[in-house]
Amino acid sequence: MTRKTFRFRAAAIAGTAALGIAGTGLVAPARAAAPHYTLTVGPAAAQRYTGINDRGDIIGIGQQPGAQNGQAFIIKAGTSTPQFLSTPSDPGNTRQYTEPLAVNNNGVTVGDTYLTPTTGPVLNVHRPTRWDGPGATGVDLGVDPNKSFFDVRATGVNDSGLIVGKTLQADGHTRAWTVNGTTITQLPPLPGGTETRANGVNNNGVVVGAAIAADKATIPAVEWVGGEIRSLGILPGGTYAEARAVNSAGVAVGQSTVTTGKELGLSHAVVFSGGNVTDLNVPGTGRGDTVANAVNDDGTIVGQAVATGFVYQNGAATDLSTLIPAGSGFHILTATGINNHGDIVGLATKTANGTGTRYPVLLTPTE
C-alpha cells in the first residue's frame, strides 16, 4: 500500500545490513559490557513498534477488530493496551492506513495517513498527520494540500511541538519542511542543490536528514540549525549518507556508503558529530547495508545489521539477542527506538534467520 519511491537511496534500512558486532563471531575490544535486558512481547493487536519516549509511551502499528488496514497506536507507559489513533474521515480506520513515525515526551505523535479512494479528497497519497495524545483524532498538518500523487509525511517532533517532515513530489523530487503551530517553512537545500529530506529534530530545534549536493552525484547527511543548512558529510569515498536521528547534544546517527572492493555502495552505520563521520563497524565486515536508527542523550545507539538488532555503547556494538534472557527463544531483528532510560523497542522473531512470525518487543535494561 505504501509507495516507496524516493530518489535518495532506496532499500537502505529495511533489508540486509552489516556491522561487526559481538555475538556474530567477531571479537570486539574489551570495554564496559552493555546492559542486559528483560523482554516484553507486545499485545496481540500490535504488529510492530516504531518508537518510545522518555515517559515510556510506545508507538507502533497494529490492527483492531474490524479494521482492514494497519493502524497507528500508542501504548501509554505502565499499560499494555494499544490506544488506536484515528482520523476524522475514518474514525475506525477501516478504509485507510496510518503510520506513526515519532512521539515526543508529551505524547504528541506524528506520522502519516494513507488515503484510499473512499477517503478523499486527494487519493492514494500519504498525508502528514499529528495526534495529540492516546486515542486522539489525527489532524492533517496542511503541508502541500490537495496535490495528487504527492506523498507528504511527518517524520519527527520535539517537546516544543516543532514537527519536521518531507514531501515526495509528483516529479520524484523530495523537499524538507517544518511545521511550528500553523507556520509551514520549507527548509533550504545545499548551495546549488535541489532536493532535501528531514528525518528528525531535537529539543534545540536542530533538524537532520540528507540533501543532494551541487554536483548532483553525492548526497551528504545534513543538519539545519536556525534554518541554515550544513553538510554533515559522508564516509571517505562514499556517495550517500543520511542522518536519521539526533540527540540533545546534536549528535546525529544514520548511515553512509563506503568506498571500494566488496563493500562498494554498501551503507555502514555511522555517527555524525563535531564535523566528523565515524564508522561504527569492526573492520572487515560489509556483507550488506547497516543503519543506526536512534540515539539517546547518553550516546547509546540502536539499529539493524543483517536481520540483527544491535546496541552500540562504550565503543562497541553488541547483538541484542545475546543480552536478553537465555532460553527466551527470541531473536532481535531490529531496534527502532531508544529513550533516555535505555529502554529499547524493536522487532523480534523466534528464528535466527528472521523468517516466521514477527513480534514487537520492549527491552528494559536490568543493570
Image: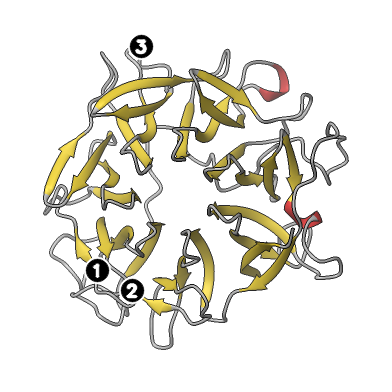
Neighbour class for label 1 at 10 Å: few (<14), some, many (≥20)? many
Q: Residue at x 81, y 36 (%)?
A: 31
Residue 356 visible in the current orientation:
no
* Amino acid type, callout 3: Asp
Q: How many marks?
A: 3
| Camera-nearest label, 2 or 3 | 2
The x and y percentages for residue 228 are 25, 24
Q: Tell me, yes or no, whether the two marked residues, 1 and 2, touch with CB atoms within 8 Å.
A: yes
Name the side, left or right, on which 30 lies relative to 262: right
Estimate how packed mark 3 is, as few (under 14), some (14 to 19) or many (20 or more) residues with alpha carbons within 10 Å: few
- Single out the mark in the foreground, 3 or 1: 1
Percent coordinates x, y for residue 92 in the rendering: 30, 82
Q: Nearer the viewer, residue 150 or 58?
A: 58
Identify the image's colour scheme: rainbow, by chain, secondary structure or one colour.
Answer: secondary structure
- The quadrant of the picture occupied by the C terminus is bottom right
- Above-or-below relation of 145 to 210: below
Q: Earlier in the sequence, mark 2 or mark 3?
A: 2
Badge 1 or badge 2: first in the primary sequence: 2
Residue holding disc 2: 85
Spatial CA span between label 1 and label 2: 7 Å
Q: CA distance from mark 2 to mark 3?
A: 42 Å
Q: Where's residue 201, x and y in %?
A: 36, 42
Q: Which residue is mark 1?
A: 138
